[in-house]
């Protein structure tokens, strides 16, 4: 999508730039007009011009972008094919098919600008001087032809390798083995898939025949590049998938073919194996307006992108700009400081960063993320330019960005290592919801138990006064006051009844008020606007009137309750008024009795006060029984909740454990991962320091609990309730520290039961070199570079969101880059987008980067020269890698040796 929205000219410019290597569908054995009649006796009835035109048009129809014209011992039709191809956007390689002196057919393909005269000279060197197409044998052997074609700048493909005129049929024994293992042999042509080949030939091609094995032959199961390039003798032959292969190139050149043959696992797909459309989200294009990167526009590849350049050329600035624009926070403290410094001092205020994002979470959609320093980012619909109410990070899901040394920082943190492993856990919404619900229920349970316990405590304090009051009351009773004041004593009980009425009303009134607050019921989720566009909106729309009717019914019920409550208040007021009149009469009699008692010096007021207190305390006994029953019920409920909480935590651990086993399987035999339940005891340490009362040491107790192989917090709390002696005998905690822990309040003990101790992740790295016996070392025993290697291998795994890393080699051992990191990167880059800034040549060369971008600094800004954009199939990019990156020449040599093809000269 080329953007036309205002302010996106630079992003549109970026999209017009090359984005590195991609798959081209290539038919590499196209025959001229005369072939079918001359060699097969099957005339097609077309003129040469009509044949060529139809062939090119048929290629366009089949989305074939590259043809190689390979007539037998002849190159006369090449120029006409090239002209027609250029007219219709088809690249044409000139070449010919030749038969060695042993009778082996070879396709010889040369640079696109080679003309028929040059090809005639090449044929002459091979002993073919007849100017017409023929089946004459070359005067040179198979291996000599391979050498001469390479010297002439071409590439060779052993045609029909498994057929009667092919290498594996024509040459047997030691001559066949020598020819097969010739370093100049880079590719063979087979009729279909490898799986369909005869068993004995399949063993050779898959490098499992020890006699024919090409050393070292790594990086693919194949001994060398395998192509489909079936004879195309008529335009309709291009419809057959076996006539073509998919070859990854950044530009269609002979060097691109050579590099593809060097790395078939990454760069070649047979005709029936059409490369799948990407399923992962990606950053499509980047642009900057202002700051050090002002005017820079980059079109990224969907697979492996590598930024190269000297110090100070802008590699880190690009990485941190992307992080800033997406609103992705650094995961380590030092990385955060570096990030903020680059944004402030290099990107600078006022700079606008624009990113075209292609999100493929459910359907493919394009968005533009814009951020102008220091404002927040915004997201636009790429087609309309409308600003959307979503965050950039929502578009790319689990996008991961790591600055210089950030991976090394993460390797030192147990919590961050576990967080990395959590990437591979399939988080179920129901599981997370259940965890939150249980946690809330535990919080509520603790609060209710604490409330009930507090009320029980207050009631017990008051009831503790009752025996003393009753004892004092006996003295008054012996003086006969009970009989004399019997009527007023009953009045005290009546007062208690009347005083209880408002308490009962209050709870009812609060319930009605809570119900009133929920009205009217929310119907926004089912109104006309909310349901617009839904296919069953006519059915769902019936919910709204139901809610309206329910709201109306509840409102009517509340109004009725209000009336009933008011009627009750009026009636209660009448009852109270009548009772007050009768009370007044009793009070008159009570005053007469008091005056008589005063004459006998008996304190009737004190007696009545004691009676009043007893009447107030007596209901508390019933309340206490009720509270104790409630407390027992809550304790039972809490035990069930704690069991459920443990189930939730166990389920989380098991999911993490399954992820660890899967990661170990994916990274075998380089990395293995295990998970320890409740391995992180830091929350327990902090809790005890905060909640254990008193002062003094707790370090021995904490260290003992931290070193336990496993721990149950529920069991620890039960032991605390049992007393310090059990803590001392069971855990060997010093008595003084055990006593402090046991003195925690019950609320703290319950919080301790609910405490979550996160799992910890143990990572081991096999530090043995390839071919040696495994040598596993724990992360804690590794060097900084080895630790970072193990973490980076985890980061490379299974995600559909981009991974961006700034100079990972700063913390990696070079051997681990080539033996561990690069193979996993090559495997995963088809499933996700990578962007690396690096000084190390192994990453772009052995990783076979689809796009290499070379940066340089010019005065006050960075730039990317056009000749420094492409893949390693571009000579200018090869030169850039050799001259700019550490170990550039060695990386190309390693690449050549790793795949067992070519020569040092042929690799460059």
Image (tube, grey):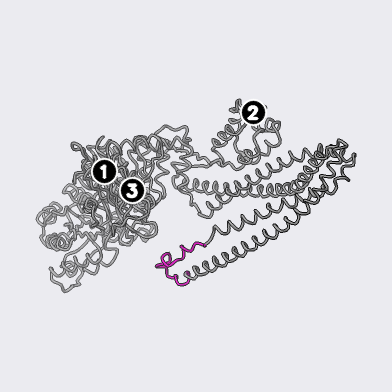
Relative depth, front residue between 658 and 535? 535
Pointer 3 or 1: first along the chain: 1
Q: CA distance from mark 1 to mark 2?
A: 59 Å
Q: Which residues are magenta?
A: 520-540
Residue matched to label 2:
737
Name the spot of residue 132 as percent of width and height, x first: 11, 62
456 versus 282 height, above or below: above
> Residue 522 lies in magenta, yes or no?
yes
Q: Residue at x 58, y 28 (%)?
A: 699
Relative depth, front residue between 174 and 135? 135
Pointer 1 or 2: first along the chain: 1
Under tag 3, what secondary structure? Answer: loop
Q: CA distance from mark 3 to mark 1?
A: 12 Å
Under tag 1, what secondary structure? Answer: loop
Residue matched to label 1:
351
- In the image, which disc is placed on residue 377? 3
């Amino acid at each position: 999508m080329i953007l036309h929205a205002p302010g996106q000219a630079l992003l549109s410019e970026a999209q017009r730039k090359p984005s590195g290597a991609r798959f081209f569908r290539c038919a590499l054995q196209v025959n001229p007009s005369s072939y079918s009649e001359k060699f097969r006796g099957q005339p097609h009835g077309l003129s040469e011009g009509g044949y060529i035109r139809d062939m090119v048009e048929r290629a366009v129809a089949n989305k074939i972008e590259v043809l190689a014209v390979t007539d037998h011992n002849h190159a006369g039709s090449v120029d006409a094919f090239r002209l027609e191809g250029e007219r219709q956007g088809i690249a044409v390689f000139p070449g010919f098919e030749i038969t060695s002196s042993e009778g082996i057919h070879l396709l010889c393909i040369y640079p696109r600008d080679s003309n028929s005269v040059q090809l005639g000279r090449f044929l002459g060197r091979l002993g073919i001087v007849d100017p017409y197409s023929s089946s004459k044998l070359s005067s040179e052997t198979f291996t000599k032809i391979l050498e001469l074609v390479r010297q002439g700048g071409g590439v060779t493909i052993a045609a029909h390798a498994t057929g009667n005129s092919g290498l594996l049929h024509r040459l047997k024994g030691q001559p066949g083995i020598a020819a097969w293992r010739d370093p100049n042999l880079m590719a063979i042509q087979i009729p279909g898939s490898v799986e369909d080949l005869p068993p004995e030939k399949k063993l050779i091609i898959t490098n499992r025949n020890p006699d024919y094995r090409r050393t070292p032959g790594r990086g693919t199961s194949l001994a060398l590049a395998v192509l489909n390039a079936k004879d195309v003798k008529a335009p309709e032959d291009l419809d057959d998938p076996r006539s073509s292969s998919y070859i990854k190139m950044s530009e269609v050149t002979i060097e691109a073919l050579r590099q593809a043959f060097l790395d078939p696992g990454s760069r070649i797909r047979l005709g029936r194996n059409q490369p799948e459309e990407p399923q992962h989200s990606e950053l499509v294009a980047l642009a900057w307006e202002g700051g050090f990167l002002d005017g820079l526009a980059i079109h990224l590849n969907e697979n492996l992108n590598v930024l190269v350049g000297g110090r100070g050329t802008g590699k880190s600035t690009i990485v941190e700009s992307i992080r800033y624009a997406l609103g992705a926070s650094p995961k380590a403290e030092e990385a955060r400081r570096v990030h903020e410094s680059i944004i402030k001092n290099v990107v600078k205020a006022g700079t606008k960063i624009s990113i075209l994002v292609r999100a493929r979470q459910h359907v493919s959609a394009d968005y533009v993320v814009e951020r102008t320093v220091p404002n927040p980012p915004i997201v636009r619909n790429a087609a309309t330019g409308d600003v959307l109410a979503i965050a950039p990070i929502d578009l790319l899901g689990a996008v991961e960005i790591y600055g210089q040394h950030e991976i090394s920082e993460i390797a030192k943190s147990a919590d961050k290592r576990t967080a990395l492993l959590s990437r591979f856990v399939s988080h179920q919404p129901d599981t997370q919801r259940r965890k939150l619900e249980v946690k809330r229920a535990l919080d509520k349970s603790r609060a209710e138990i604490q409330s009930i316990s507090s009320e029980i405590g207050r009631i017990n304090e008051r009831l503790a006064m009752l025996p003393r009051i009753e004892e004092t009351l006996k003295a008054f009773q012996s003086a006969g006051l009970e009989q004399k004041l019997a009527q007023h004593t009953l009045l005290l009980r009546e007062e208690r009844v009347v005083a209880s009425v408002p308490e009962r009303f209050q709870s009812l009134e609060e319930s009605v008020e809570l119900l009133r607050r929920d009205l009217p019921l929310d119907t926004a989720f089912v109104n006309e606007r909310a349901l617009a566009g839904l296919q069953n909106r006519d059915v769902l729309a019936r919910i709204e009137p139901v809610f309206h009717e329910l709201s109306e019914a509840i409102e009517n019920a509340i109004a009725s309750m209000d009336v009933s409550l008011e009627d009750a208040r009026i009636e209660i007021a009448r009852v109270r008024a009548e009772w007050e009149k009768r009370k007044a009469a009793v009070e008159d009699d009570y005053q007469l009795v008091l005056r008589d008692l005063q004459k006998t010096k008996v304190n009737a007021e004190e007696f009545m006060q004691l009676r009043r207190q007893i009447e107030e305390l007596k209901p508390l006994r019933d309340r206490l029984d009720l509270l104790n029953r409630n407390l027992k019920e809550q304790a039972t409920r809490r035990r069930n909740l704690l069991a459920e909480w443990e189930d939730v935590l166990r389920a989380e651990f098991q999911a993490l454990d399954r992820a660890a086993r899967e990661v170990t399987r994916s990274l075998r035999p380089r990395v293995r991962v295990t998970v320890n339940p409740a391995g992180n005891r830091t929350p327990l340490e902090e809790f005890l320091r905060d909640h254990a009362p008193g002062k003094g040491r707790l370090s021995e107790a904490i260290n003992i609990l931290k070193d336990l192989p496993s721990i149950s917090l529920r069991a620890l709390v039960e032991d605390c309730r049992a007393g310090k002696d059990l803590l001392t005998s069971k855990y060997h905690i010093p008595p003084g520290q055990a006593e402090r822990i046991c003195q925690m309040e019950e609320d703290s003990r319950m919080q301790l039961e609910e405490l979550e101790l996160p799992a910890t992740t143990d990572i081991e790295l096999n530090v043995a070199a390839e071919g040696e016996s495994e040598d596993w070392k724990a992360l804690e025993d590794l060097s900084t570079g080895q630790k970072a290697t193990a973490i980076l291998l985890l980061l490379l795994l299974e995600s559909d969101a981009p991974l961006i890393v700034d100079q990972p080699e700063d913390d990696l051992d070079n051997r681990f880059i080539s033996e561990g990191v690069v193979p996993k990167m090559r495997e995963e880059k088809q499933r996700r987008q990578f962007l690396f800034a690096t000084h190390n040549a192994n990453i772009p060369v052995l990783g076979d980067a689809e796009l290499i971008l070379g940066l340089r600094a010019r005065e006050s800004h960075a730039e990317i020269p056009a000749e420094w954009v492409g893949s390693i199939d571009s000579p200018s990019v090869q030169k850039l890698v050799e001259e700019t990156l550490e170990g550039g020449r060695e990386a190309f040599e390693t690449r050549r040796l790793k795949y067992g093809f070519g020569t040092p000269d042929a690799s460059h």
